[in-house]
Amino acid sequence: MSAVLQAAAPRQRVHWSDRVAQLLLAAIAAALATFLAGPLVALLAQSVQAKSGEFVALDNFFAYFGTPALADSLWNSVWTSLVVTAVVLPTAFAFAYALTRSCMPWKGAFRTVALTPLLAPSLLSAIAFIYWFGNQGVLKGWMQALGVEQVYGAPGIILSQLFSVFPHALMILVTALSLADARLYEAADALGTSAARKFVTITLPGAKYGIASAAMVTFTLVITDFGIPKVIGGNFNVLSTDVFKLVIGQQDFPKGAVVALFLLAPALLTFVVDRMVQRKQTSMLTARAVPYAPQPSLGRDAAMTAVCSIVVLLMLAVAGMAVFASCVKFWPYDLSFSLRHYAFGIVDGEVNTAMINSVVLALWTAVAGTAIVFTGAYLMEKTRGAQWLRAPVQLLSLVPMAVPGLVLGLGYIFFFNARQNPLNFLYHTMAILVLCTIVHFYTTGHLTAVTALKALDAEFESVAASLKVPFWKTFWRVTLPICTPALIDISRYFFINAMTTISAVVFLYSPDTRLVSVTILHLDEAGEIGAAAAMAVLIAATSLAVCILYLGLGRLAERRTQAWRLTK
Amino acid sequence: MAGSAEPFLRLEGIRKDFGAFTALHDIRLEVTQGEFVCFLGPSGCGKTTLLRIIAGLEAQSAGSIHQGGRDISTLPPAQRDYGIVFQSYALFPNLSVFDNVAYGLVNRRAGRAAIAARVAELLKLVGLPEAGAKFPAQLSGGEQQRIALVRALATSPGLLLLDEPLSALDAIVRVHLRQEIRALQVRLGVTTVMVTHDQEEALSMADRIVVMNQGVIDQVGTPLQVYREPATPFVADFVGKVNMLAGTVEAPGRVRIGARSFACASCNGSAGRNVRAYLRPEDIVARPIAEGDANIIESKIEKIEFLGSYCLVRVAAPELEGQALTVYLSLSYLSEMGLESGGSMKLRILAERMRVFDA
């Protein structure tokens, strides 16, 4: 039969309730286009324009490489990131191995301490290292004995980054190592395989995708981080501080855009590799795999405990120094207890309003972000029709992971600060901070929601349609209650990140919407490092309190919505 | 189809393309009111796609569907009239059994008491009157599937669609539940379409079986027709065990296999043509063996597979060019005759039962 003779395919009429879902999906698509694609396009456009606005093709890129200082920054960024990755990866692997494959005691405590850096802005560690090794640092002499003249610069950046990216690498590796099939180890044992050979032939290959992913993520986090080099970088220039100087200091937007694009490149690469890796990792473990349970082994467990103890003690030394320094009267001369840094920060630094702003931002992000992300994921996973919208929405939901905060923030300036943009009124408002933060952390929330939704039977919606129940009733009565734990996770993730983020919002706040995390930078610049430490500790304390609140909320929700899981 | 009455469900020229791949080709089918029809075929034959098209969960690329005299070809699922049961049960895990069964009733704004009465009636119908307050996870697989069944029937739909409803259950429950579903369907008189890849299930439950292969309907018929008179080699092979013998047409109504010639009505075509004759194991019998019967062959026992009360016996027939045959023989017959591997025996071929197709 020739194609010409075929009648057009009969089109199914769209039920009005499906129409509602499609309109909502279109709204999500429009929002992502406006608040993600728009700024990124504006950034790209900016990079090929002269300051005056005319099109100059790649001139800005040539000019960049013609400026030796800027090209040096590129090299500085790359090599420090490589060093950090090379050190973090084996350490985090050993730690993750201890948590998943040994019978080490106090696993919960080790894990909790190792994850604490997530609660504070990354620059907390930089402040702590200034107290340890800075001009008036406690161990400055030791450092100089090792031949390092001063901590400001590459040494400080590397040390601080080690601390702040460790939990990110750890989480990925723990996930990778917990996906083990006990049957492989049993088969190896039955064949009389040595422990070393099992490690090389089963454990490492099983975790290789996780290792690759952890390496890429670590590298990207380090190269795109802004807070640490700002605080402890001294005269050692890196890409992220260059962006800030070019845009905020010199108002050279085109060149700032060029540098931002350099930051986007490794992140994009990481993103692509990570997606490929994820696909392979999940397909590796079949439904029939038997979960691996480690057996006690004195030598290994003792060694693992020793390694983890050293790591945890070092981390406590960093975090503890920040807390300690924030509570002393006058470093290093009068070490008696005092809350004067807190008082100074809160009163003189106007941190009281900044603190309120930060909490308001975090609350809005947690509530609106969760609602938007979950709705988007639900519409993508569980509703029918509007096929043409689905691929773009899918892509836009994943792209934020590949966009460093600095790049996103810069894009927001170019996009929303443009006078001809009808959304210009958003500029310098709390709303734009909320929107930017939601977009910045969209992907992780989206993936969490998708995972939760995928665990639901794909036929719920078909059954509901056959029973003539509109989709939102099923959403309300079934989908939402079952997914409550995931919703709580997403919401906590948004809250903590909104509290601690600096990179995107540093370009977008106004005098009325100053945030605590940004205030730390200002206090540090003003030489008030004690107050800066105090404020970083304050953020960490807030995050911690919120985490505990969420824990309670989770327990409550579990009792109310998950009762059906516990019965049997 | 009985009389000229309009069929309850009529599919005309249904085609489904997935990109360049055509999953269903020009499907035509009529189902009468109250009938139980099974779509039977291997995985990937398009049977589930066809069911989902009837349900409106997939849109056909061409063709029309009429149900109860109404053209439903372009209606969304919510505007069609059916209840559906999936292999996975798809019970809402966080709702009680009562709420699951009442799920479609609540939406009809029936009174609370009326709903409670209807749910109680339905739960009793499947022998689970006490289950209302439990969560689905507290029930066994078979019980969950019964609940899914009454949830689909709660609103008294005109059509019941079953998508491999028994495949996730273990063997004993499966056999039990298939009789239960059939009895319920007969009692309620609801027109039912079931998809299955299990031929035993289809043979034991259906009024008519629709055998599908690679997106095409190979045969529609009663279970006995499909089994006894398969329309294509695929049907003969897929439904039940079968022996396949290579031969040639000797004359219309006569097939030659090796040195022997058999009378067989289904053998037609020109003489000399290569054919394949399909013969069920039970159509080769060990007794009675009468002298002079043209259908008796000598055979040598190659292997006896013990399956309990009967055995699967593989024999080679020198007169049929040594082609192998599989025969069912009762254990008591084997021991009575003292037959074992390597021995030889006479077998009678019920040649009229042979189905002959072009090779």
Image (tube, coloured by chain):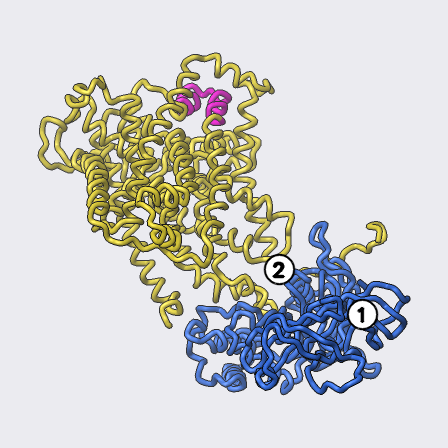
Chain colours: A yellow, B blue
Q: Which residues are magenta?
A: A242-261
User: Which label is found at residue A18?
Assistant: 2
- Secondary structure beneath label 2: helix
Query: Which is more toward the observer, B239 or A373?
Result: B239
Please tell me whether the stretch drawn in magenta is mainly helix, strand or loop. Answer: helix
In the rendering, at what x and y percent does residue B151 appear?
55, 76
Depicted A369 relative to depicted B317: above or below: above
Cα separation, mark 2 vs mark 1, equals: 68 Å
The amino acid type of the residue labelled 2 equals Asp
Query: Which is more toward the observer, A61 or B279?
Result: B279
Please check the rendered image and state whether residue A260 is part of the magenta-colored stretch, yes or no.
yes
Depicted A556 relative to depicted A198: above or below: below
Please check the rendered image and state whether residue B203 is part of the magenta-colored stretch, yes or no.
no
In the rendering, at what x and y percent does residue B116 appear?
50, 83
Left of B321 or right of it: where is B156? left
Query: Which is more toward the observer, A329 or A215?
Result: A215
Quadrant assignment, res B256: bottom right
User: Which label is found at residue B259?
Assistant: 1
In the rendering, at what x and y percent does residue B264 appear?
83, 76
Chain hosting mark 2: A
